[in-house]
Image: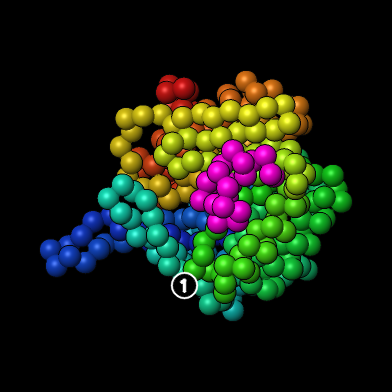
Amino acid sequence: MKDVVALGELLIDFAPVSTDDAGYPTLKAQPGGAPGNFLAALQQYGCSTALIGKVGDDAFGRLLIGTLDSLGIGTRGIIADACAFTTMAFVTLDGTGNRSFSFARKPGADTCLRTDEIDRSLIEECRVFHFGTLSLTDEPARSATQAAVAFAKEQGKLVSFDPNLRKPLWPSEDAAKEQIEWGLHQADIVKISDEEIEFLWGLSPEEGAQKLLREYGVKLVYATLGPKGCHFANRQGCGQVDSPKGLHVVDTTGAGDIFGGSAMSQFLRLNKTPEELTVEEMRAVTRFACCAASLSTQTHGGITSVVPEEQVRAIL
């Protein structure tokens, strides 16, 4: 039995690591994709995981599957498609390590996952099912994701959702909002950024968290605040944790996903339902996740930037 099964994209992040004498960037290929980053953190912190998705039957697809295999993440649910290339993301970093994205994904293999290709036995055997919105941008992956979420809910699984908004991948902002709204209505646990809350409703993180609890039926909310930390809330109460100070940020790619996976790992150790967590338990979970995410920004990449638990504990 797996603790967490995620469905969604695996891709290659190309990020600049240096510049030549003529000013052209040298790009490094890093295994990534939000669900993979999320599961890498969970796997590092003692949970058993697996991913459902599709990559191209190409060198990058094989690299991604091999990377997950090396981390112990289950790959039985990943299909290699000879008719589509593995998705690629090109990351531009500013002076503070913050990113902007462009994508080679027309189509990318991850968007080609069909409903009949989902390994439902993986969902049957897990405690938590996790998904995001990149698998909702295009058909047939959108219908496959919706079917998987419906099956997880029928099986009584805890459902986790991260909007992970990437505007360039959507035909319009309204289309993005529609699918994010759908995802929020399915979820028990939501990790959402302050920017996503502003995009959806024009609210503060604190107001957005309360809206999710009251109007969407979400049971536990992490509203991340970028370098400032995270606001957390359930029906027991709410609070905020600041990110650790004094770390040198190199690359924030995957930090939000690593936050989500790290928080989930600590939540699962408590063996409670999301609505049962006390404010102090939520604070401890959130502090660990903030520290793990912050430490991951000190090196390039997402999946490969998760640090060992002892390093996180050292700065709690």
In the image, residue 312 above or below residue 100: above
Residue 23 sits in which quadrant? bottom left
Q: Residue at x 41, y 35 (%)?
A: 295
On the question of residue 235 being in view, the answer is yes
Q: Position of residue 230 (x, y in %)?
A: 52, 35
Decide whether the magenta segment is chiefly helix, strand or loop: helix
Question: Is 201 colored magenta in this rendering?
Answer: yes
Q: Secondary structure at mark 1?
A: strand
Residue density around tag 1, few if under 14, some if 14–19, many if 20 or more, within 10 Å: some
Q: Position of residue 269 (x, y in %)?
A: 67, 27
Residue 296 sits in which quadrant? top left
Q: Is residue 203 left or right of residue 95?
A: right
Q: Residue at x 62, y 44 (%)?
A: 208
Region in magenta: 192-212
Number of marks: 1
Q: Residue at x 30, y 58 (%)?
A: 16
Question: Is 307 colored magenta in this rendering?
Answer: no
How is the structure coloured here? rainbow
Q: Which residue is mark 1?
A: 104
Q: Amino acid at mark 1?
A: Ala
Split into 4 quadrants, where in the image is the N terminus? top right
Residue, far left: 21
In the image, residue 311 above or below residue 80: above
Question: Which sits in the foreground, 308 or 172?
Answer: 172
Q: Position of residue 213 (x, y in %)?
A: 72, 40
Q: Position of residue 26 (x, y in %)?
A: 26, 62
